[in-house]
């Protein structure tokens, strides 16, 4: 899936025919901190996802009672901010 913002995905969900059934939308946007736990500056963070695992998790969550729909995406990239000094 291409790079996307949570707002874009929320609009996609609301555009679906049965969107009135939605009780909650959960989104997590990872943030790269400006300092590391050791207090050194952070210049960014490389990130790779196990896409097979992600697909398995989404399929499982989609079977849970009262779950209307599940979407998931990962923006894999090296943040312009990535190595701890």
Image (cartoon, rainbow, N blue to C red):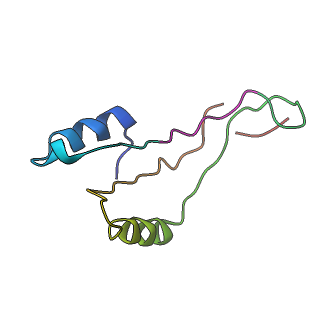
Q: Quadrant of residue 42?
A: top right
Where residue 80 appears, as percent x and y from the top left, is 61, 32
Q: Is residue 3 left or right of residue 68?
A: right
Magenta stretch encompasses residue 30: yes
Q: From the image, which quarter does the C terminus lie in?
A: top right
Q: Is residue 65 left or right of residue 77?
A: left
Residue at image x 17%, y 44%?
19
**Residue at (29%, 38%) from the top-left corner?**
10
In the rendered view, would you say 55 is above or below 20?
below
Q: Position of residue 81 (x, y in %)?
A: 66, 30
Percent across and percent down for residue 2 are 35, 47
| Quadrant assignment, res 22 | top left
Q: Is residue 56 magenta?
A: no
Q: Which is the main secondary structure of the residues drawn in magenta?
A: loop
1 lies left or right of 81: left
Point 85% across, 37% down: residue: 37
Q: Is residue 10 visible?
A: yes
Q: Which residues are magenta?
A: 28-34
């Amino acid at each position: 899936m291409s790079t996307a913002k949570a707002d874009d995905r929320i609009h996609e969900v609301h555009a679906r025919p049965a969107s009135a059934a939605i009780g909650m939308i959960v989104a997590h946007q990872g943030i790269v901190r400006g300092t590391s736990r050791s207090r050194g500056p952070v210049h960014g963070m490389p990130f790779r996802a196990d896409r097979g695992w992600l697909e398995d998790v989404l399929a499982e969550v989609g079977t849970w009672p009262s779950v209307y729909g599940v979407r998931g995406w990962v923006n894999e990239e090296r943040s312009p901010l990535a190595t701890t000094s």
